[in-house]
Structure formats: structure tokens, C-alpha cells
Image (spheres, coloured by chain):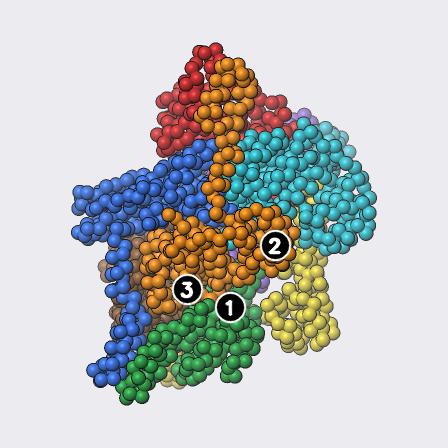
Chain colours: A red, B cyan, C blue, D orange, E brown, F purple, G green, H yellow
Amino acid sequence: MNVNEVEKLLKDVKTGETSIEDALEVLKNFPYTDLGFARIDNHREMRTGYPEIIYCAGKTIEQVREIFRVMSEKENNVIGTRANQEMYDAVKSISKNAVYYPVARIISLQKKKASAPDSRIAIITAGTSDMPVAEEAAITAELLGNNVLRIYDAGVAGIHRLVDKLPEIKSCRVIIVIAGMEGALASVVGGLVDKPVIAVPTSVGYGANFGGISALLAMLTSCSTGVTVVNIDNGFGAGFAASMINKMK
Amino acid sequence: MNVNEVEKLLKDVKTGETSIEDALEVLKNFPYTDLGFARIDNHREMRTGYPEIIYCAGKTIEQVREIFRVMSEKENNVIGTRANQEMYDAVKSISKNAVYYPVARIISLQKKKASAPDSRIAIITAGTSDMPVAEEAAITAELLGNNVLRIYDAGVAGIHRLVDKLPEIKSCRVIIVIAGMEGALASVVGGLVDKPVIAVPTSVGYGANFGGISALLAMLTSCSTGVTVVNIDNGFGAGFAASMINKMK
Amino acid sequence: MNVNEVEKLLKDVKTGETSIEDALEVLKNFPYTDLGFARIDNHREMRTGYPEIIYCAGKTIEQVREIFRVMSEKENNVIGTRANQEMYDAVKSISKNAVYYPVARIISLQKKKASAPDSRIAIITAGTSDMPVAEEAAITAELLGNNVLRIYDAGVAGIHRLVDKLPEIKSCRVIIVIAGMEGALASVVGGLVDKPVIAVPTSVGYGANFGGISALLAMLTSCSTGVTVVNIDNGFGAGFAASMINKMK
Amino acid sequence: MNVNEVEKLLKDVKTGETSIEDALEVLKNFPYTDLGFARIDNHREMRTGYPEIIYCAGKTIEQVREIFRVMSEKENNVIGTRANQEMYDAVKSISKNAVYYPVARIISLQKKKASAPDSRIAIITAGTSDMPVAEEAAITAELLGNNVLRIYDAGVAGIHRLVDKLPEIKSCRVIIVIAGMEGALASVVGGLVDKPVIAVPTSVGYGANFGGISALLAMLTSCSTGVTVVNIDNGFGAGFAASMINKMK
Amino acid sequence: MNVNEVEKLLKDVKTGETSIEDALEVLKNFPYTDLGFARIDNHREMRTGYPEIIYCAGKTIEQVREIFRVMSEKENNVIGTRANQEMYDAVKSISKNAVYYPVARIISLQKKKASAPDSRIAIITAGTSDMPVAEEAAITAELLGNNVLRIYDAGVAGIHRLVDKLPEIKSCRVIIVIAGMEGALASVVGGLVDKPVIAVPTSVGYGANFGGISALLAMLTSCSTGVTVVNIDNGFGAGFAASMINKMK
Amino acid sequence: MNVNEVEKLLKDVKTGETSIEDALEVLKNFPYTDLGFARIDNHREMRTGYPEIIYCAGKTIEQVREIFRVMSEKENNVIGTRANQEMYDAVKSISKNAVYYPVARIISLQKKKASAPDSRIAIITAGTSDMPVAEEAAITAELLGNNVLRIYDAGVAGIHRLVDKLPEIKSCRVIIVIAGMEGALASVVGGLVDKPVIAVPTSVGYGANFGGISALLAMLTSCSTGVTVVNIDNGFGAGFAASMINKMK
Amino acid sequence: MNVNEVEKLLKDVKTGETSIEDALEVLKNFPYTDLGFARIDNHREMRTGYPEIIYCAGKTIEQVREIFRVMSEKENNVIGTRANQEMYDAVKSISKNAVYYPVARIISLQKKKASAPDSRIAIITAGTSDMPVAEEAAITAELLGNNVLRIYDAGVAGIHRLVDKLPEIKSCRVIIVIAGMEGALASVVGGLVDKPVIAVPTSVGYGANFGGISALLAMLTSCSTGVTVVNIDNGFGAGFAASMINKMK
Amino acid sequence: MNVNEVEKLLKDVKTGETSIEDALEVLKNFPYTDLGFARIDNHREMRTGYPEIIYCAGKTIEQVREIFRVMSEKENNVIGTRANQEMYDAVKSISKNAVYYPVARIISLQKKKASAPDSRIAIITAGTSDMPVAEEAAITAELLGNNVLRIYDAGVAGIHRLVDKLPEIKSCRVIIVIAGMEGALASVVGGLVDKPVIAVPTSVGYGANFGGISALLAMLTSCSTGVTVVNIDNGFGAGFAASMINKMK
């Protein structure tokens, strides 16, 4: 339920089109809808201006479908992350407008399109294997209303692949750096540009990578300033935070 | 090395002005020349306004003093972090304008003052013991030219202390949340506001806190969106990144 | 072995009814005899009312069936945790009264029903994905003779979903909080109510969650008082301990 | 904000007494107002009887003294944990009634004495070296108004030292087990009694003890039912939670 | 090649039945046979009196079969651990006398039977789920020529199950204690008997068990004397070391 | 693109066989070719003298095929590591000369053969199970133009298997030691020879091996001098570094 | 209280030299003496044949003195481990016969001397820095009545130092191997002899040694058979277990 | 024991000069005798030129002095690492020629000077705080007879400081990269040069640096080829291995 909907309700109360009892009933369920297994946060978009996000991993297909069903009845945009094809098929069966991004593992249900600011978000990966995380970040940022500059496979083992893109990177307002293994790319980018860098460690690698710990620790202890970090493989979180900064007025 | 320079090189080879051997040598270093001085100089120009930062821990008093001495000859502002009183005394002996912030452990040498934007940075701590980290963040932000809203000791064990301050917090452009122990404050703040939250885990606690790991992991896995994380006790890093965002145009 | 028995032994030594060698042998095991059957039997008597518990994971289907077969010959209630459908089918084949709770992964064989006290146990989860652990706790508590208040998906990212349930939560005698990721919910609940909180970290999450470590450490280092913790995903343990407290006279 | 208040707001909108803009503004903060003062105040009222707790470690002596000064002006009891002698001296200088328990490292300022229930709390340690943690638990419990049964140095390497105290232990309502090294005592006690056991791992030991991790993990994975765990060396937390249970009506 | 074989060779040289050249050829390959992928340690039994042991995990079926083939040509006993059914089938195809113990995952090829000493090895497990590890220890000990007393499912949650068996346990020369979860059984047994205890942590458990770390650390930090530890799930190692001690003269 | 190709291009420019415009076009793409998902480092062989290496794990089959396709158009040798059979089949379909080494999991596309120096690289494994890692090292070294001495299954539990190969090992210029479990072989070899030892910990083992950590830490803390270490299971890295040293002039 | 004392008491009861009341009084305190902070296990020597052991670390000087005082009144031998000079001075003041071994950090109070078996215990260290742990093991073994063969500084970096001593080592009944860093010595010794090896990892080293973890993991995952492990730096535990095996009949 | 010796033994058996029992005894120790003095002596001869190395940490001042005293009687060079001033004073008192390098913490006693090859070793550090480790590496390399190029404080946050020096770095034969925090410098250097890189992680940093783990893991998982790693802060090990490579013919 967004600001427009509440405003309309109040107007209807004022004009008498809606009785106080009925309005009360609506407002009572306003902050969330209780599905038993999930409490949908209707108040969210009003509170934060952002769409509802559903973390689909660990939910059953039925739960995902049901949550989308309830939400599709409102005007909100909905984003489902870490979603597989089966979940999408179930959502598709109740909402024709649902879109699936398989590399990013995102289901999107977009009721209205956000207008994008002029500034862009740069998304740089160290390797090709980091692409699923990068696409999760990129699609998230795009769905939230941003333009994205993708630069994939520009790791420090061949640093010139990054260098000649520097002018374009510097023209962006915020930069997402995605790297597994030793995660050095975040420090190198952070040392070359003066924009906020959001670093995403990935679980790409093996052995002493320990599922992304090596990159995570490296990014947290980066000697470059302006670098902040999100969870391992958390492309969504990086895209969301970058959008917050990019859309800042 | 840009296209024009390569073109000229080829022409010189054609005319014999440059031997094939010499041209070969140039081309071997081709991608890096690009990375060299000119570009870096540009980069520095762009960064004007940012002070030089010295991480003092692990340096000898003599090294700290010497670095400040060299820098004080330029027009730059200088910030020394993790500095103790002895280091400050040494710096003071060569530069009367040096200032020391003992709680923040920062030495500052300010040649020119940056003008602050209207928007503020909120700095919220869970407990009183987090103050040294908070002050490191606050003083850093202030020295970089920002106004800071300090809200200390507002942990989730008494969440009304935070709720109270929400309107003022929401009026800031970016929020730094500083907490040790279980670090829950970052998630709670992130769920209540729609501004970028930079979370700083602290080593405050004991036992299963493991020197800040409990708060670090909690902040990295936060279920709230818009939260990014810096290293344990890294008040400086949070203040610097927040300043980048706050001063964004 | 009590004082009277030792006194009798000494008398028998004095009268020669017992040889010194035999008495020596008895005294060698003296402190443990005490621990032996009589005392343990008393102990069991005292525990009457509690069912036998079988941890099924790691056991073969044959072992689970056989244990249930032996136990079903007594009057005791039996609970099998971490049981899969195959195990249930095997148990069902020998005992028609066995019941299976698939979400909770519990097999129950109930010979007599415990009467429930008036007070309830609240079970609160941060997300929908925590439901299997929550149901393990809830079914355990119910089988042990308690009424349960379930509040699922009330994580701190939308804290108002929790707040309007506070009056009902406060009416319970003990509260189980179940959360993965950063586990902040335990601290928030602990700060809002003055009832014992049993916190269950779950393995829900990814990356720096490390299979539940982030939530586990967060709950152990909670700044809220009255919070105790059980093993990751240990819904059964939380339900059992909560029952002990709830049924306390 | 309760239903009546929302109803009144709607009526005021209808009658024009409140503009739609103003009503919108109120509804935007709707769930949090709920969380605000009124509810929290109720909550505090309910908690009356519990003293204020100050975690002194990491605070300066001046901060500790100041907090005690402010608090001593109210009628509340105050407990300062992890306090050293210097902190106590500072507190003493402003409040003659402050008492210091050096082994427990607790400063107490007691304005009114809570009446203790008949039931007791048993506190059992594995070794003599666990005494500081045990005393922190014991003094906490006593200051909160409980009688305590202390059984120290009853580790499993000589289990008969525990066995002959079993009847007395079983007469208590809740049991705190404190152990370092392998922490086996919690499992053994949990297997012998049918009372809630709160286990406190201590950092007593060396090598693979890793500052208490061995005991912590052992207690979390205990095969005995009814065992919950608090942070390493957290005697205070165990004493507080045990008091909650012991004073339960 | 064992002592008897070498002795026979020397006698044949002395009597002229074998030429010096032929004997030299045999002795040249005596310490090991090089299969390319494996160097079979022929000298082992002579050096240590024990059969050759093959750790089958990580080897291909072909490699396992080939190693057994070469070995079956000598008089040595051979034991293959961590072997699956497929490996056994392959070995069986070349050596009819091979025996498979599926719970213990051991393939045995016994050319001569060792005579067992009068004293026994006790093997005690905390739970039924520890049985595969226990059987690996038991079969190993039996194949090496020992009699074994098996006491399974005697964990500390019901310590009377153990106490009962104490006299029989005390009659053994060495005791293997096998436990997962918190591994407390090793400390309890170590405190009750005055025989060497070899503790085997198992990966039985979940969550904070971390694949056996909880039991491993608990056993290493045991407060009972006379306890030594082997790797997680290493039933073979415990059985081998216990045999060394039990067969000691 | 290697030195010879660039040299030829420059000559053609000089002689007029190639126009400056055409040469410019070639050189513009010289540092890398952007495939969208991958930036192929064409400058690498010129910069380092070594072929391009593709880490295939985590890439899709299509991505691997496409990268090989682009590269096969140049004169460079290409090595793909951690490649499976499906990847090879795809590569084979576009380049008949591709070769697959299944144990080493390497795809090779060799346009020109490097001449090998007289000195050899010794590769020693502790066990048969370490063979896949060893073969990755050996094939890498051979493809880079080195002769390799393989000594497999020479672990310290039967140290004589190593000793009689010492003279041959000492004749090599650099030694790769590959071991899982406790990784002691690196220290033993390092103590017996005075050549650089590159140690590769493997994930062979179980329990406290923790996926190779035991061997990794052991090798890093080796008391023998001259030992350096690469990542767990990183046969490729060891082979590459050894080749650098072996081919040193 | 040992077997002889109990036997004498029984005889005195039989002859009437001691009344049943007096004997009862003695036997009542026989299982342990409660000092409040410590429960002295008087039954221990009767149960295990070994003296009482006091782990002094973490105890106050007063507590150590008091425990020794009570014990010195009986016939038992007493060993205090991890004791410092101050503790010894306090013990000395109440018992002239107390002896201090400063390298081993052991206080001994020997009322009767155990006769040593012919067989010896070998104690081998990798380096000189391991000596404090080695001496703790050696003195423990000697006080328990064993002869010890000390071979210090025989690490694998110079393996000939060990090989030399092999015949003497092989003549011992049980071997203690003590090593820090990579702990390879345990595997090497275990591969050369057919005697039980008790491995003691030490905290000697730095960096990736992590306070002894590298050696601990290496010893636990040793590829040599017959190796069991005790806690990091636990010389006492190794000496005690070795004595149990060496004195075995 | 070589073939000739075995042949002679067999002949002696044949002729009766040696009894079968004696021959059997000899053959039992056959592989190890081989490892014994002769071979080891050869080995030492081969190593002539390398000094004796003493790791002083953990040794007493007396032990250090005594070891130097014994060694100074031979012609060998001696290097003592991790030595403090007190140790040096003790060594100086017995050998006037001893030299102390306080930053590197090295004591050197040089009887003869090694001649240095033309090629140099580059030592690059990320920060000023890494200097003690770098000097340990540099002094070690110099004492072993190498010329060293020192480039300190060239971290990736200001990568132009490194690029500048590339030609000089590339002229060295082997490169040591020393960095704490995120250790990215090793990857960047490894990507720019085609020389063996020995990476040394340092404990410089705080928080998620965990005493050097962040840099260690980053270096082990480096995406650049040709990088091998030594223990945290192990400047000596890097200097030694680099010397081996640099002095290679």
C-alpha cells in the first residue's frame, strides 16, 4: 500500500465514499498482511519508497507463489531474489507480467517503472565466473530505476583491462566491485577513483578461498579508502545500496 | 599511451625514425604507460580537497613525525589515524597547528577548511564503550567537511532510546551505525530508515564476541537492505565513505 | 551406598562375617555404587511424564523402527526427532498410532496426553525460512503438553510486524526466538519483554552466515538480559527447555 | 497508536478538523509511534523490580561514576558488572552505600531489597578456577532476590563429588552449571536432573580450549535435554536468566 | 615380505638353493614395489610387525584392486579402510579370500591369523549413530588379533547405562571411547577407570558440532587424565593404537 | 599475440605491406579482446612470455568454447585448467588440435612447442590420492616446456620409499611436494635437499584435515628452509612457478 | 587415602583398635574433602592408583597452598602442574618436602616412591623451544615412577639427528613426540617405530602456527599409524598417559 | 647400505662368515642405515656455503649464547633470527665479530663472505609498517650473498608508486612482495612481471586482519600466476628461498 493509495482512502473517507468502519478495517491490516507463514510488509514502500523484496531461498514454491499472489493485488513493485525456474513458473501461473532473469536468479513483477537519474552505477568483476553475482546486482539496480555500466573480467592479473576503462568508470556516481579469490580488485579500484566503492566478495575460487572468506577479509581490510563491503555473493545488497546512493538528490 | 601516440610510433617506424627494436620495447610496456604519471596526476587533481591520510599504528614515532614534516610543507590537509600521545607530541614539535583528538586517536593538520554541505551524517552507537570508534568516525567526517549528528548508547536492549530520535536520524543523508556484541543495531536502523547505512562492528564485548567477529558477521548477514560494512573498529573508514556520499552532488 | 550400609559393612568386618579383602573390594567402588540403579530409578520416577526422545538422524531405518517397537510396549510417550518419511513408514508399520509432522520432521507415539498449563509458550521467527526449526520447537512443546503461540516472519527489517503482537507475546510465560542471518530478533525481543527468552540460531542465510554461526554468535553476545541459547537449528532443544519452564509450578 | 486513536483521526478527516496532508503524515509514522513512549513506559513499569545493569568494561572510570551518580538519585537498585577496584572507589566517593564484590567484580547499589522465593538456584562449577564466573552468577542472583546453593569443584574427573549432592541439587528450581575445558559437566548434570540447566562455558584452560570455545561448543551440542547456554564467562547473564525462572509464579 | 620369508631366503642362499644374484634381485625390490601410482611398503611388516594398511578413499577402484593384487602374492595380511562395496567387488574378483565388513567399510585379506592376548579392548560409544566409527575400530582391532568388548549407546545423558558396565570395562587393558556432539563420555570414562583411554570424536551431530569439532576440542581439553585423542571419525587409528597397547608384553 | 607477431607487423608497416591504419586497428585490440563476459588478455604472452591460462571452473561450457575460439585464431598456446569432459568436447568441436588430460583436468591447445631446458622438475606426492593435483602440476610444467620426474606415493609413513630416490631428486632444479593430511613430506624433503621446494597442500584426508587446512598450515609453518606454498589443490600454480624457476637462465 | 590405609583401618576395626564410630567418621570423608572452593578427591588413588593432580593455573596462591596442606596430611603423593615460583614458596612454607621443577613448572610432594619398571619412555622434541613442555612430560613420568630417555632438538629439518638414535628409541615401550610449527616429527617417528606414539603439539612458532593449531591438526591427521594426540602444550597429559602404558603389566 | 654391501652380506651368509640371525638383524634396519650418516654427511657437504640458522624466539638467552659459542668454533657462518638485544649482548660477550640488525632482529656471525651473483632480489612492501619483515628478508638475503633492491611503501592504494619502479623491478631475478591488510600487492605485482614472486603476508592491520590471516588467504588465492607464499611475517623464509633461486646457475 503506497502513499497514493492511503491518500485516496482518506479522500474517500472525507467525501463519504468510504465509511469510517471500512477505512478502519483497511488501515488495521495496513502495516502487514498475515499469511500465517509470512507477514507481508505493506507499509514498506510507504516507509522506504522501495518495493517489497522476497528472499526466495529456503521458501517452498507454494510460499513464493502465495506471497507474489497477495502482492500482485496491490500497486507495489515486487522483486524475488535467489529464485529458481520452478518458483518462476509458479509465479508466472498467477501473474502474466512476471519476468525471470535466470543468470541473476531474480523474479520481477513491475507495476510502475521508476525513472532513472542521469548518473550511472558501474559494476566491475574480476572474472567471468563472478557474473551471476554481478547480474544480481545489475538487474536489482535496473529494476530500482538506475542505468548500469557493466565491465566484466577485469581482474588485477591483467590490470590494463581495467585501466583503459577508467574514464568511463570515473563518470559513474558509485561503483560496485565484485571479485572472488583474493579480492584485490576492490583495493585497486578504490585507489584509482574517488567514488564510493561497494565491494562484493564472491565464493569463486577453491581451497584457501574457503567459500569466499579470502575475498571477504581482503575487502574488509582494504588499504583503499571509501570501500564498504556486503556479504559474500550478495549482489542484491550491493545493487540496492548503490541505488540508494545513485538516486540520492 | 593513446591512439595518437601509437599512430605516431608507427609512422616513425615507417620513416625509419624509430627502429623496430625500439618500437617493440615501447609496445611491450604499452598498456601500463597508460597507467603512468599523467593519468595519476589527473587523478590527484580530481581528489583535491581530500587530505592525505596516515595510518600511524605500526609506525615508529620518528616515521610519523617525518611524514608530517614533509607533508606540512605542502598545502594539503593531513590526518593521522590510530595515533598515540607520543606521536602527537613529536608532530607538535615540528608543526604548531597540529591538533590531537585523544578519544578518536587522530592527529589533524588542517591548512584549509572544507565547506560542509547542508545535509548531515548521523552516527549512532549501541553502547558507551563504542565511543572511541564513533569519535574516530565523527572527527574524520568533520575534518573532511561534514556536520555530524551524534547519538550514542542507543542499543536494541532499550530500543525506545532509538525510536525517539528517528525523525532527526531520517533527516540525515547517510547513517553510520557502530555496535559491538551482537551488532543488531545495524539491522534495526536499516529497517527503519531509507538511507544508506554504513555499519561498523566493534571489538566491544568478550567471549563469543571473538574480538568483533560476532558483530561483523551479524552486520554482513543483516536482513535489512542498504547496509554495507567496514572492518572491525574502523571508524575512520566509515567516516570517510560517509563523507563521500554526503558530499555527493 | 549410604552411611547405614557402610556401618553394617564395618560391623561385619568386626564380627568376621565379611573378610577384609571383600570389604576392601566393596569400598573401592564405594562412591559409584551410590550412583547406581536405585538412585537412577528414583530419578526416572521423578521424570515420569517426560517421553523418551530418539534422535533419528544418523540411525538406520531398521534401528529407528526397532527402538520404537521396544518402546511402544511400554506406557511411555515416544518422540523421534530429525526423522524422515521412510523412518515414519517403518514405525507406522509396527504401530498404527504413530503420527508424523513433516515440516517438524517429528514422529510421535503418544500413549497418554499430558495436561497443559494455562500459560503459553510464544514461538517467534524472523523469517518464513525458519519455519522447519520453529515447527520442531512447537510440535515438541505441544507433545510435551503446552499451548503454543506461533508468530512467524516478524524479523527486525520490518519491526512493526513484531510490535503489534507484543501484548500477546508478553502474556506468555517463556519465549522462543528463532532467527538465521544476523539473529538480531533475539536481542530486540529480549529488550522488549521481561520473560526468559530461549534463542535458536538457524542456518538460514548464505555467505558470512557460515551455516548459522553469524546468528549463533550474535545470540550468545546479545546485549539483552534473560537470553539463553541452544544449538543451531535445535528447535527440539528449545521446545523441551521452554516446556520445563512453562510447566514449572 | 491504538484503534481508537486511528478512528478519531479518520473522523477528524471526515469533519475536516484534520487535513488530508496532516493525516497522511501521522499515518506514515503509525507503527513506530506504537513502539514509542507509551508502550515502552508500560514495559518499564512491568519491569520494576529489576535493577539497572551497567556493563562497566570498556567504560572509563568517569563514565561509570557519572552513570551511578545519575542513577543513585532514583529509587532503583543498580548493578555494575565487570567492574574493577578503581571504578568502585570512584562510585564509593559519591555513594556511601555502594558495595563491591571483588571475586565477582560487581558493584552494587541497593535501595530496596527484593524478597526471595523459597526455591533456590544451584550453581555448580567444574573446578576452582571457575570461581570468578560462578561468583558473578551467584552475586547477581542474590542481588536480584534469590537464595543460592553453591557447589564448587565438582568436575566429571571425580564425579562422585557431584553425586552425593544430587538430592540437594534436585531440590533447586533451576541449575547453573559452570565449566571450562571440555565443559562435560553440563551434560552430566543435565542427564541426572529434570530442571532447566543454564550452562556457562568459561575460558579456563589452555591450548585447544581456545579461550572457552571447547566448552562453548560442547555445551551447545550437549546430548542432554533442557540445557541452554550463555556467552563464555557470562556469569551475570546466567544469574539473571536463572533469577527470571526462579522468581516465576 | 616378512621375517620368515627373508630368513628362508638367507637359508636358501646359504644352502645354495638360491644364487646370490637372485637373492640380490629380490632384496633390491624388498623395501617397496613401485606400481607407478603407489609404492607398496613391503618392508613394513618386517619393520613394524603389522600388516600393510590401504586407505582406499580417494583411490580409484582400479588402483585399489591393483594394490591388493600385488599384495595378495605375498604372505602379508592386508587391510583396506574406507572401502566401498565397488572396491570390494573388484578385490574379490582377484582374491576369493577377501572379506568385506560393510558397517566398518573394511576389506580384509588375511593370510595368517594373529593369536590374541587374554586381555581385551573395550569400545564404548555415546550413541547408536557412532556405530560405523566404532565398528571400524572394532574390526581393525580384531583383524590385528585382539578380543573386543563392545558397549554401544552409553552416553552421559543416561549415565547409569555406563555405570552398570564399569566392572567389565575395568577388566579391559585399554579403552576406546567414541562420541560425537559434546564428547563428554571420554572425560566421564577417564575419571572412572585407571586404564589408557583413546578418544575418537565423531562427526555425529549438527550445527555447532561443525563436523566433529565440538567433540574433538572437548576430548583434547578433557579434565580427566590418561585420555589421548585421534582424528574425527578415525576408528581405524584408535583400533590400531589400542592393539599396540593391548598386545604389549 | 606474441613478440614475433608484433615484430612482423612493424616490419610490414616499415615495408609498406601493411598500412598504418590497418596496423593501428590491430594494435588497438592488442591489449585485450572484449567478449562481454570475458576480456582476453592478448598482451599477456608479450608481457610475461607465457600463454594465456583459462580457469574453467565456474564458467559455462559456452563461455569456455568461445574463449578458446577467439584465442585459437592467434599463435598463442592456450591452457584451460579445471576443465571437465563437456568443456573439452565443446572446445574440440571448434579446434581439432585441442588435447584433454582427464586426470589433470587440463585442456591444451598448443600452436608451438617450447624447448625444454636440460634441468628437470621433480614432483613428489605423499599418497596415491594426491595424483590429480600432481598431474595438474606435471602437465602444466610439461606444456610450458619442462621435463618432469614423477615420484608418487612416497609419504613419511614409509620414508625409505623417498630416501632411495634422493639422488635423482637432488639432480632436479626445483621440487614440487604434494601432500594432504599432515603434509609432513614438505618438511622432510626440504630438510634433505638444497633446492627450492614448492609445497602443495591437498584436500586429501578427512576430519581435522578440514579440506586441506591441516596440510596448508603445516607447510606454511615448516621448519625446513626454502619451502614456499601455494593454495590447497593448486597443482597448476605449483607447476607454473616451478617452470619459471626451472627455465631461468 | 590409599589401599594400604583403608586396609589398616579395616584391620583396626576387626581387632577393635578403632571403634566403628571412628572408622565411620573417617570413611565418611573418604570420597572427598570439601574446602568450599575445592573438593579434594581422596578416593582417587584407591580408584586409579595414581596421586592427586592439581592444575594450579587459575587458582590463587592461597588456594594452592590450602589444597597442598590438606593433602600433605595424608600418605598420598601430590603433583601440582602449571605452578609458578610464588605458589611453590607458599607450599614450601607448609611442607618442607615440597620440590619445585622450574622448567616443568611442577611442584611435587612425594610421600612414597613408586618403583619403576625396566622399560623406558622416550621423549623426543623437534626443537629446543619445546623443552618446557617436554620437561613437564618427563618430570610427570618420573614422579609417577618411570625412567625416561630424553632426545631433544631432533626435528625433521635435520632428520639424521633422529635416525642416529633409532635403536635406543625402539628399545623404549612408549614414545612421546613433542613438536610445534608443522609437527611433522610425530609422523616421521610413527613411521619408523612400532611402538605407541603420544604426540604433543606445542605453541612454539608464529603466524600460521596460530598458537599450536598447525601442529595439532598435523598430528591429528598423521598418516602414520599408532599416533594419538593430547592438547597443545599438554606435557603433563602425555607423561601421565605414557606412564599408564609403560607400567602396564 | 648400497648394493655392494648387500651383496657382500649375502656372500658372508653363504660362506658362514655371518650367521643368518646377524644378517637378519642387519636387513631389518636396511632402509634406514641408508639414510644414516654417510648420506647425510654428503648432504651437508653439498650444502656447504649455507650458514647455520638459529630460530632464537622461545630459547633462553643462555641457550642462544651457548649455540653461538659452539658454532663460532667452526668455520661456518651463523645467522640467528628473531633475536632481541639481550640475546645479542650475550652473543657479543663471547664473539666480538657478531653483528646485530635491530629492525630485522637478526644476529650475524660471518666467518667468510659469499660472493653475490649479478642478478638482484627485489623486495617490495605495501606499507612502512611492513619494514621489520622486509628487513628480515633483506638482511637474510644479503648475508647469504645477494644484492637487494628495496622498494618500500608501494601499496595498491597508490599504485603509481609501483608502476614507476617497474623497469627496475623487472630487471631482478626474483621478487619478494610483503604486505599486510588485504595483501593485494602480491597479485598486482604478479600480474605485471614474469618473475617468480614470493609473497609474505604480514600481521600489519587490525580487526578482520586477524593477525595476518586476511593477507595470507589473499596471497594463497591470488589470481596471478607465479606467486608462492610463506608464513605470516616470515621475512627470513622469503629471503632464504629467494636466495636459492637467485643463486641458481
Tag 2 and tag 3, C-beta contact below 8 Å: no
Query: Of helix, strand and loop, which one carries label 2?
Result: loop
For label 1, the crowd category at 10 Å Cα-Cα, with few meaning under 14, some 14 to 19 and many 20 or more, is: some
Q: Position of residue A14 (x, y in %)?
A: 49, 13
Question: At label 2, which amino acid type do we have?
Answer: Ser
Q: Chain of mark 1?
A: G
Viewer-side residue, G159 vs F75:
G159
For label 3, the crowd category at 10 Å Cα-Cα, with few meaning under 14, some 14 to 19 and many 20 or more, is: many
**CA distance separating discs 2 and 3:** 33 Å
Q: Position of residue G192 (x, y in %)?
A: 43, 70
Viewer-side residue, G85 vs C197:
C197
Q: Evaluate whether label 3 is on the same chain as label 1.
A: no
Image quadrant for the C terminus of chain G? bottom left
Residue located at (36% from left, 37% from top):
C150
Residue located at (69% from left, 35% from top):
B147
Tag 1 and tag 2, C-beta contact below 8 Å: no
Tag 3 and tag 1, C-beta contact below 8 Å: no
Q: Which residue corresponds to mark 2?
A: D95
Viewer-side residue, F6 vs E108:
E108
In terms of sequence position, does the residue under pointer 2 or pointer 3 come before the other?
Answer: 2
User: In the drawing, what numbered circle is on residue B247?
Assistant: none
Question: At label 3, which amino acid type do we have?
Answer: Ile
